[in-house]
């Protein structure tokens, strides 16, 4: 027993011995060793400045944009719908016919049931989109058939519009989802019959010469000011049935959905800033 006790003490003493010190060249070598995946900045690799002015610059100047009040378009926005007409929109059936939806006297438009989707004449790439929508106060249906519409960016990626108030459905198809791909981070709807806002920041995908996708699109969405999509990868088109597809494309229209089931969804105050 005594022997074992001394053996234990000897082992502890040995393990507590200081590790041999590295010499200076070994330390330097370790510091210079390349570190995988570590971000470094060329502009900050010079000797560090000691005066504040050395890290301040004035050119190029930042453009001035006058913000709008209460969701009104900023000074550099392209206004797609301000309530006066549907001139910026066409039917998605042939991309040329007049948009057949109802123009209301209160500055909004409403889906004309079973007339089909409508889309912008102009095509957009990277953009900041503001759009307001409202599902009817009078509830008539359930699930995906209650106040279903959608904002399709590049004409093919749907951000879901749905009356989800006391109306559960599959989470990757609920309001604010990238349809059948990405549930929102939160359900941030106002009560049925009140106006919702979507602020959408979208970056297009990139494709190689053979048409293969080499960089995914991303989308950020604020729903009534609440972040619900945080730079989310768009994995492809958003079909009702089947997997997302990735056809090569450039700029595309903004399309609004007629779900064809008496949705009575309305839109107003739509503007976009190209990025
Ligand atoms: Mg929809």
Image (cartoon, rainbow, N blue to C red):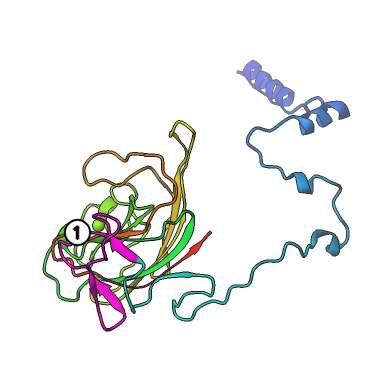
Q: Is residue 115 left or right of residue 235?
A: left
Q: Position of residue 218 (x, y in %)?
A: 45, 50
Classify mark 1: helix, strand or loop. loop
Looking at the picture, how far across and down is residue 63, in whole percent?
64, 68
Furthest-front residue in view?
Answer: 96
Q: Which residues are magenta?
A: 89-118
Observer-nearest of 236 and 221: 236
Above or below 224: residue 240:
above
On screen, 191 above or below 52?
below
* Res 231 visible: no
Return the residue nearer the eye: 238 or 191: 238
Residue at 41% in and 40% down:
248
Q: Is residue 102 magenta?
A: yes
User: Is the residue marked 1 within 8 Å of ligand 1, measured from its CB?
Assistant: yes
Q: Position of residue 89 (x, y in %)?
A: 33, 65
Q: How many marks?
A: 1
In the depicted structure, whether residue 152 falls above or below residue 66: above
Report the residue marked by disc 1: 259
Left or right side of 253 for 109: left
Q: Residue at point 33% right, 45% down?
A: 237
Q: Nearer the viewer, residue 200 or 156?
A: 156
Q: Is residue 2 visible?
A: yes
Quarter, ligand 1: bottom left
Q: Residue at x 82, y 26 (%)?
A: 26
In which quadrant of the rendered view does residue 223 lie? Answer: bottom left
């Amino acid at each position: 027993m005594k022997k074992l006790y001394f053996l234990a003490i000897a082992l502890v003493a040995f393990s507590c011995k200081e590790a041999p010190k590295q010499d200076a060249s070994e330390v330097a070598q370790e510091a210079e060793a390349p570190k995988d995946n570590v971000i470094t900045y060329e502009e900050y690799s010079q000797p560090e400045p000691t005066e504040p002015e050395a890290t301040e610059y004035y050119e190029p100047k930042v453009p001035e944009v006058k913000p709008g009040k209460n969701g009104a378009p900023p000074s550099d926005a392209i206004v797609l719908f301000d309530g006066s007409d549907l001139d910026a929109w066409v039917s998605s059936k042939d991309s040329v016919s007049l948009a057949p939806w109802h123009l209301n006297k209160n500055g909004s438009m409403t889906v004309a049931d079973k007339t089909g989707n409508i889309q912008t004449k102009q095509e957009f790439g990277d953009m900041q989109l503001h759009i307001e929508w409202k599902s009817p106060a009078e509830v008539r249906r359930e699930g995906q058939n209650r106040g279903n519409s959608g904002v399709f960016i590049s004409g093919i990626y749907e951000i879901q519009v749905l009356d989800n108030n006391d109306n559960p459905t599959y989470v990757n198809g609920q309001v604010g989802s990238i349809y059948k791909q990405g549930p929102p981070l939160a359900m941030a709807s106002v009560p049925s019959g009140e106006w919702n806002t979507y602020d959408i920041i979208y970056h297009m995908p990139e494709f190689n010469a053979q048409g293969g996708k080499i960089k995914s699109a991303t989308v950020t969405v604020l729903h009534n000011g609440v972040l619900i999509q945080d730079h989310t990868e768009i994995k492809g088109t958003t079909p009702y049935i089947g997997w997302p597809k990735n056809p090569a494309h450039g700029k595309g229209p903004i399309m609004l959905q007629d779900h064809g089931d008496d949705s009575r969804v309305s839109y107003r105050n739509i503007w976009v800033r190209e990025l």
